[in-house]
Image (cartoon, coloured by chain):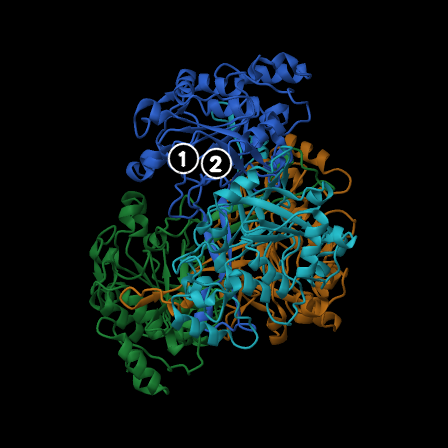
Chain colours: A blue, B cyan, C orange, D green
Amino acid sequence: MGCCTTEEDSGDSALEAKAQSIDGAGAMATRNWGRWGEHDEKGAANLINPDTVKAGAALVRTGRVFSLAMPLDAKHVPVTPGRFPPQHFMRTDGGDYAAGLKRRDGFQTTDDVISMPVHAGTHIDALCHVGDGDYLFNGYPLSSVRSSGAKKLGMEKLPSLCSRGVMLDLCALHGVKKLAKGTVITPEDLEACEARQHIRVTPGTVLLLHTGWLGALPTLGIAEFFSGEPGIGMAAAGWVADRGVPAVGVDNFAVEVIPTENAGSAPVHRMLIRGCGVYLMEMMVLDELAEAGVHEFLFVAAPLPITGATGSPINPLAIA
Amino acid sequence: MGCCTTEEDSGDSALEAKAQSIDGAGAMATRNWGRWGEHDEKGAANLINPDTVKAGAALVRTGRVFSLAMPLDAKHVPVTPGRFPPQHFMRTDGGDYAAGLKRRDGFQTTDDVISMPVHAGTHIDALCHVGDGDYLFNGYPLSSVRSSGAKKLGMEKLPSLCSRGVMLDLCALHGVKKLAKGTVITPEDLEACEARQHIRVTPGTVLLLHTGWLGALPTLGIAEFFSGEPGIGMAAAGWVADRGVPAVGVDNFAVEVIPTENAGSAPVHRMLIRGCGVYLMEMMVLDELAEAGVHEFLFVAAPLPITGATGSPINPLAIA
Amino acid sequence: MGCCTTEEDSGDSALEAKAQSIDGAGAMATRNWGRWGEHDEKGAANLINPDTVKAGAALVRTGRVFSLAMPLDAKHVPVTPGRFPPQHFMRTDGGDYAAGLKRRDGFQTTDDVISMPVHAGTHIDALCHVGDGDYLFNGYPLSSVRSSGAKKLGMEKLPSLCSRGVMLDLCALHGVKKLAKGTVITPEDLEACEARQHIRVTPGTVLLLHTGWLGALPTLGIAEFFSGEPGIGMAAAGWVADRGVPAVGVDNFAVEVIPTENAGSAPVHRMLIRGCGVYLMEMMVLDELAEAGVHEFLFVAAPLPITGATGSPINPLAIA
Amino acid sequence: MGCCTTEEDSGDSALEAKAQSIDGAGAMATRNWGRWGEHDEKGAANLINPDTVKAGAALVRTGRVFSLAMPLDAKHVPVTPGRFPPQHFMRTDGGDYAAGLKRRDGFQTTDDVISMPVHAGTHIDALCHVGDGDYLFNGYPLSSVRSSGAKKLGMEKLPSLCSRGVMLDLCALHGVKKLAKGTVITPEDLEACEARQHIRVTPGTVLLLHTGWLGALPTLGIAEFFSGEPGIGMAAAGWVADRGVPAVGVDNFAVEVIPTENAGSAPVHRMLIRGCGVYLMEMMVLDELAEAGVHEFLFVAAPLPITGATGSPINPLAIA
């Protein structure tokens, strides 16, 4: 039985009823709250265990390491209106010494500062990032996320994301360089990829999906890039949860297809993050991995333990 | 022949002569510039290769993953005067919804921003972080680091730091909870650890040193913590370079012993980073690893690819 | 009849009753809500009118201009724990050109960024800065202040603070260089200053009080400076409101005496800002003005119109 | 004799010769270095004196105060590529209390942070903002502006800008709502305004010029707004300096006409700021002042004393 049908296991039926009624018509009520205990804050990362880590390590055959992050700077990171691109400021630099800054004992050091939205560039969403009906994943109240940060489900609750990783290549499946905007990735697509790639997404497997969308950014331009995207639909989201995927990463900006299937706001975010505790990773750079034909690997992402953050920039690695 | 004695291989003898003359009396002239080509910007990370990665992966026996980072927030991260602690700002939070913020279609999202010095908390120094006599590692001019960031040797030039890792436990060697301030770690100490732990630091091995200094921060207080520290001396730095270590990480704030042996400024930083292209990782959390008695592992650190940065916060992992 | 006794004029008696009941035992219920209309967001700044501006301008006799602000930088601005000092970052500087930055057509420009708490250094509090019992000044709900800023009573609602200004010199009155920590400034003190200085605080007059506390910062040290301060007590706060003062500025960090008279939290802030719409200005530099013996002037402060801000750094001027 | 012809008075003829040679073909060599002493850092603000302040105060006839600043927020402030709009972050807000934040003793406070380029929104340029041939105004080396800020000519060197102010209405002169992009404002235009408005720009008078460009921003859109602008040409810049104007403010983004007359970079900035020490104020809101037909006033701008800054956001006031 998949994680998505375990609602009846929830200990807090009053809470359930309340949330259920609020979830209402549009939003799917799919969730697995209580699956890992009522105090759990790690969600589907609980599906990672020593065996899945070892299974990942066993996939390191060539010793090749792929960095799946995009450059972090104001020039390269596209941001939606309201967010600002990463700002990088030097506090001491070589120019200062060229201009006459005294060197203590010959020693010259350079120093700098980074300021950025945590959801800019290649990043992971923490489980506190999405709420619905006043509740976060596992029934934690949305009101636990305040100006001082998230008291529950903050980024620091996920010390690492290290497990077997699989990349399903939708572009290769369809023989295209990039999926078209609005393309809904379905469970059938995912299983066709599995078949084509002779691979299977097992519980604890971090799943990466290659759509080609981010790689097309230079061609698309920022406005078109953010106007929509190919991504997973609700059925595929259910498939992801049912397969026991702790985290899914895509080379687009929101994992899910846009426009959404129900024209509502972020239904896949709601089902996966808030409903099932599955982590989403966005703006991943997957073209090199796809070109190399690397489909299985040890996946490693190590979010910065920013206390109470709703996400973190990451530099995910595929070690093959 | 160790990396420290390869100066004669440098193709640019005029540059050598110039740098040599500038290095002058106090600073050690130890360096290996040109070892990986005159255009190299990765330094000792070149000592990592598919074999060392595979050797690391082969050490994953229990599937246990250790996160070696400290929490990133203003309360936990001690900073030296002039730097500010990590600042975390919410752009949207649960309080806003509690106060009446309209939910589009029921959807509620939270969002935030991080602003911090890249050398705060657990972090890695990029090779552009240290200069001497107007030169950075490999003879790149310090003047290539400007307000717009480092044109050479910036953080983005190290896509990952993934290899076999070894932790030498100086505390266990000396039977103490923490080394005393000012304790100089010597080659003899390191070799005694090797013998005691039945382990060897081989080329390409990321080296972690457990001193207990960071773990003592709550007891020491910030002023005492930054007033000095146990750390490696010049001889140990030479040993590190000679052994082919690409990166060394310590649970203190500067890797090297303070006060320094020659009373000069950061001689170990100068020898290792600027002279030999060895990466330093500071403020690492090693107590749990030491307590678990885990001495060999797959080491993974993935710096954020902040273009032109002099370092990056990291969440290093030891996967055993 | 003073502003503090006009509660009965409030149109919204249900609101009154509610707020009254919440104000409870400790907090004084003093307030003048509704005095300037139920939609008013300027508070006691309504007491400034063309006549008080002209009266201020008529005081410009010598043409001397006093800047009453402290330097804004990390070194000079003391901050309480949790706040960070002003951070100033260069985006382009002379060092860059010295290091070789290309000059377009010979032109060289420098550029920078400021990041700071609005309540750091010399600053003014907006009326949305203080709430009690879920209400802000004039009965606006505290919940109107969210992550996106204050919808009501934000800094931008006060376009300027320009009127006749008077400085009462408590130090001169008592013949001391600074008042002692915890000294309660009373109405009797203020009236004794008036008598001694042959001056009167009339409606619309911006009132500055010289205590010597900020001037003593270098001697006191930051910890002692923030451990308490001389300042106005509740009776003097009532006097300030009754006299029709739109804004009161003091050379201390909180205007009011600390420890507070009732051992409660910020009773003067609550009475003046939230109860009566009176603006507070803190960390003002008044020593030079006091030394010059300038007691009457055109006072000008122009807050930055930061939309929804709870305050603004200011450089207040006394033009005499 | 105007300020622009005093080069021969410079004490440092070698410096003169050097700068002269560097100024070269394109850039005009106009400058008045040394006019206020070789150590001067206030430039044309020296033309303000008690008499011009008193003359300004005497113009306060109606007691009306005009704020000439635009709202400071990400939505309202247009920025050129590379700069980011003002970012405003709440550290504590009403939402937090609505979500359950404990109130100490009933007291509720809100708190926030501003982060912004100093040249965003309505602002003033400090004299260190512009260099040419390695020199700033008065012969100070550009290399004195480093990552730690400007050692010379920083914003804090101008404690206030308070004097008689005059607004010349170019729109009214030409009977248009806004001058067309690229319109060069000439001395003849300025003198025609003087004649039409029965007013004279005398030494020490802060000069405001109404072009209508900023008011047209909503119609123009950001791209067109920044693509060029009406503004003063080189002849008018010379006129401004010759008339003894300490500061000139315009409702456009660069004071000077764009495209520039000589197709070079910022010739007016170079002549006025770097050559003659005249302060420029940009993005001023002048439409209301123009509509009210207010042409003479006490002008007050009080830059934030950000140590070493190249400018400051301001909320300039015209008090009439």
Which picture quadrant has residue A154? top right
Give the quarter of the figure containing the N terminus of chain A: top right
- Inspect this view and state whether residue B281 appears: yes
Relative image position of residue A142 (x, y in whole percent): 60, 29
Q: Is residue D213 left or right of residue B228?
A: left
Residue in front for this viewpoint, C282 or B311: B311
Relative image position of residue D129 (x, y in whole percent): 39, 66
Total numbered labels placed on residues in the image: 2
SS for callout 2 = strand
Q: Which chain is indicated by disc 1?
A: A
- Alpha-carbon neighbours of circle 2 within 10 Å: few (<14), some, or many (≥20)? many
> Residue drawn at (67%, 53%), measured in percent from left and top?
C81
Q: Which mark is residue A318?
A: 2
Instruction: Work out which residue is located at the far front of the displayed protein and give it.
Output: B1
Q: Which residue is mark 1?
A: A289
Q: What amino acid type should be assigned to the residue bearing mark 1?
A: Leu
Q: Which mark is residue D22?
A: none
Residue in front for this viewpoint, B42 or C139: B42
Relative image position of residue C270 (x, y in whole percent): 67, 46
SS for callout 1 = helix
Above or below — where is B12 with respect to A9?
below
Q: Is residue B139 left or right of residue D27?
A: right
